[in-house]
Image: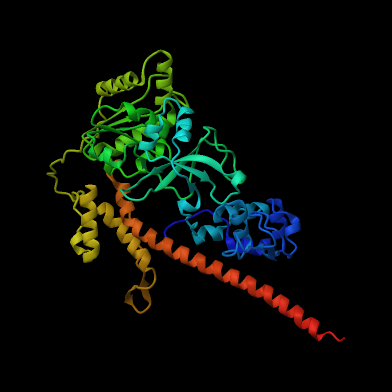
Amino acid sequence: MLRQFHAYDKIELKKSITGSARRLLIDNGVPSETLDGKHHPCPKCGGKDRFRAIDIDQGVLFCNQCFNEKNGDIFSALQWWLNCSFEEALKITGQYLNNPPSLAAMLRKTEQKSVPFTDQVEFLGPDQQKLNSWAKSKPPLTSKAADAAGARLCLWPKKAPHNKQLECVAFPAFQGPDKPSGWILYRLNGEDFPTIENGPGQRKTHLLRGSADGWVFPGGRSSAESAHTIIKVEGIPDALAFYPWLPEGSAVVTNTHGAKSAKNCPIDIFTGKRVIVIGDTDIPGIDGANSLAHEVAPYVSEVKVIFPDGEITESNGKDIRDLMNENQQACIDPQATVDVLMLKAEKSEPIQMPPDEPLQEDNSQDDGPEGYKPFPIECLPSVMKEYVKAGSNSLKCDSAYITLPLLVVSASLIGASRVLRPSNDWKVPPTLWAVVIAYSGSMKTPAMKLALDPVYKLQEKVHVRNRDMIESYETRKAIYDTRMKDYIKELEGISKPF
C-alpha cells in the first residue's frame, strides 16, 4: 500500500456508534417518527409506504426506491441522506462521538472510493439563452468563448431533491487527450456556492469530487497543440475573456486547482512552444506564475512571465478581467488591452535556467567523487526496460527518474512473498528506499507519476472490490439479523401456552 490518508477508522467508529445511530440520524435531519422500524413514506424521495429502519442500533435504513442496496450501516445511511462521501460520513460520525482521527486509520491507509462525475451532476441539453445570461454576469465573457471551452449546463447535486439542486455551468479539465480528469462548476446565476454543513464553505466555484487538476482549453486541445505560442492565465473567467482576442497562432489555457498547482499538471502541451504566463497581482498569483515558468523552462523555446500593472496584494489581486473592465470604462476595447499585454511580454526578458556546471579536470591522485553514470537499464527485466525507455524518450528525461520509483514500487508489490536468504536464519525482504535529486523543472514529477500510476490503478481496483464486498456482506448480515429476530419472535409466539 503506497498512499496514506488521515481518516477516521470505520471499525472503531462502528463499534462506538452502536446504540447511538438513531440520535445521530435525527441530529442530521432524519425525521424521528420514521425510525421506529415500521413502514413510512420515504423522507427523501417521498414514496409512500416504502421506507423503514431495519436495524436502528446500527443505523441500517431501507427504501425500496432510492436506498435498496449498499445500505448496511450508519455510514451508508449518512451518505444517502446527506449526499456526502464515505470519508465525510466517517468524519461526521467521529465528530458526533467527539473522537479524533485514529492512528489505526492512518496506518491502514484507506482510500475513498471515487464517485463517477455522472453520478454527481445531471447534464442538461444546450440552452444558449441561459449560457448568455451566465456570461453577462462575468463581463467581458461571451457565451461563444464558454462554448469553445466545452461548457455544459447541469444540475448539482444530482441526487438531491429537485428544489435543492443548483443550476450550474460545468467546464471539463484534461490531463490527457481522452476523458476529462475533472469538472469545475460555476453557478448559472453568477452567485457563490453556499456553505455545506460539514463540508466546504462559501466559494466561487465547486470541483466535483474526484477531480484531478488539469488544463481547460478554450478552442480545444488541438488549438494548443497547433499553436506556436501558449498563453497560460489564472482561472477560467480570465481564459474566456482572453480567448476572443488572441493573436494569430496563439492559444490560451488555464488549470482548475489554482495558480500554485498548475506546475503539477502535465506540461507536455508546452514542449517546444513559446510560453507566456500571465499571473494575478497577488502573492499566490506571482508565486504560481513563476513556479510554472521554471517548471516548463527546460522544454520550451522560451517562457516569459508578466502581470497586469497595479499594486501587489496578499490576495484577490488584479486579474485580466479586472484590467479589461477598467479599460472598457476608459473607452479602451478588449483587443487593445490584449495587444498591450502582448507588447509587455515582448519587452520582458525570458526566464533563464541556471547554467550547467562545467566539468573541471581533476588532476589530483586522491579518490574524489566519480562523474555521473547513467542507470544501467539493460539490467532490468525486459518489460520494465522497455517501459522505462519509452517513458524517458517521451518525457525527454533521464531514465533514472522513472527507474528508481519503479523499483521501489515493484519491491512494495513483492512485499514479503519473496525474500533473499543468505543463511537459514537470515531473510532479507525487498525493502528499497530511493530519492531523485535534480533541478526544478527537469520532469521529476511527471516521471514519478509514470512509475506510480500503474500501481495506483491496481490499488484502486482492489479497494473498490474490497469495499463492495464488505458493504454487500454487511447488508446481507443486517437483513439476516432482522429476519432472525422476526423468526425468534414467531417461535416464542408459537411456544406460549394457550
Q: How is the rendered protein coloured?
A: rainbow
Q: Is 52 rendered above or below residue 295?
A: below
Rendering coords of residue 377 (x, y %)? 20, 59
Is residue 254 something one can see in this rendering?
A: no
Q: Nearer the viewer, residue 461 or 224?
A: 224
Q: Which residue appears at 36% of the width and 24% of the height?
A: 307
Residue 41, located in which quarter of the rendered image? Answer: bottom right
Q: Is 497 rendered above or below residue 31?
A: below
Q: Nearer the viewer, residue 307 or 381?
A: 307
Q: Is 166 rendered above or below residue 469?
A: above
Residue 269, located in which quarter of the rendered image? Answer: top left
Q: Nearer the viewer, residue 444 or 250?
A: 250
Outermost residue, right direction?
498
Q: Is residue 118 left or right of residue 14?
A: left
Q: Is residue 165 left or right of residue 400?
A: right
Q: Which residue appears at 67% of the width and 74% of the height?
A: 481
> Where's the N terminus, which quadrant?
bottom left
Rendering coords of residue 180 (x, y %)? 38, 48
Q: Count the labels in the image.
A: 0
Residue 351, located in which quarter of the rendered image? Answer: top left
Q: Is residue 202 left or right of residue 181?
A: right
Q: Which residue appears at 25% of the width and 62% of the height?
A: 384
Q: Which residue appears at 37% of the width and 66% of the height?
A: 413
Is residue 457 something one can see in this rendering?
A: yes
